[in-house]
Image (cartoon, rainbow, N blue to C red):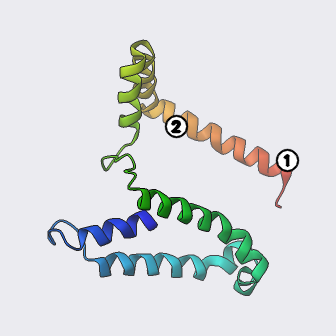
């Protein structure tokens, strides 16, 4: 989220036709937050006031605060994080493999080609569903 806000702030001075306005991004963030809170009690079975107790807030907020400190530290140091083009980040991974190990790249490309076939995708999804149902039956709701 902090990275998104940095991009919105940087784009505010750039061409306006390329990106949505910062107000649209802020509205989307607010809508996403409200949607999560509106579904909280229905999904968890616990009232929303429980989620606002100090213990729960601290338990959930410290990893976010740690990430924010790291992000601010990297920004203050001028560190440029790797830029991925929009879309599939797997293409970046495959490019690294192609440079490092050409044989492995051929195997990964072949596997990816086979995995995108409907039969393989359907069987993988069915196996994941069966595994999920079996684990739910064994472990039960928590």
**101 horizontally vs 138: left or right:** left
| Quadrant in which residue 19 is drawn | bottom left
Q: Position of residue 56 (x, y in %)?
A: 75, 75
Residue 71 visible in the shown view = yes
Mark 1 and mark 2: span between their CA atoms? 24 Å
Which quadrant: the C terminus? bottom right
Task: In the rendered view, tell whether residue 44 sits above or below residue 91.
Answer: below
- Find numbered disc 2 in the image and state the secondary structure of the residue it sits on: helix
User: In the depicted view, which residue is nearer to us: 67 or 24?
Assistant: 67
- Find numbered disc 1 in the image and state the secondary structure of the residue it sits on: helix
User: In the depicted view, which residue is nearer to us: 125 or 103?
Assistant: 103
Q: Position of residue 5 (x, y in %)?
A: 38, 70
Circle nearer the N terminus (1, 2): 2
Answer yes or no: do the residues labelled 1 and 2 have beta carbons within 8 Å?
A: no
Q: Residues within 10 Å of mark 2 (few under 14, many from 20)?
A: few
User: In the depicted view, which residue is nearer to us: 140 or 35?
Assistant: 35
Residue 1 visible in the shown view = no
Q: Residues within 10 Å of mark 1 (few under 14, many from 20)?
A: few
Residue at (71, 77) in percent of width and height: 57
Task: In the rendered view, tell whether residue 108 sits above or below residue 58.
Answer: above
Residue 1's mark?
none
Q: Position of residue 99 (x, y in %)?
A: 36, 21
Q: Position of residue 124 (x, y in %)?
A: 57, 35
Residue that numbered label 1 is attached to: 138
Outermost residue to the bottom? 49
**135 horizontally vs 68: left or right:** right
Residue 122's mark?
2
Residue at (60, 40) in percent of width and height: 126
């Amino acid at each position: 989220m902090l990275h998104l806000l940095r991009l919105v702030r940087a784009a505010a001075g750039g061409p306006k036709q390329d990106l949505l306005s910062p107000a649209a991004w802020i509205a989307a963030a607010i809508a996403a937050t409200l949607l999560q809170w509106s579904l909280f009690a229905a999904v968890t079975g616990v009232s929303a006031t429980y989620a606002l107790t100090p213990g729960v807030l601290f338990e959930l907020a410290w990893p976010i605060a740690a990430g924010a400190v790291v992000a601010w530290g990297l920004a203050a140091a001028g560190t440029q994080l790797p830029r991925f083009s929009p879309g599939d980040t797997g293409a970046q991974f495959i490019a690294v493999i192609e440079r490092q190990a050409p044989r492995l790249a051929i195997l990964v490309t072949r596997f990816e080609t086979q995995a995108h076939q409907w039969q393989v995708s359907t069987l993988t999804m069915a196996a994941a569903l069966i595994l999920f149902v079996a684990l739910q039956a064994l472990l039960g709701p928590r």
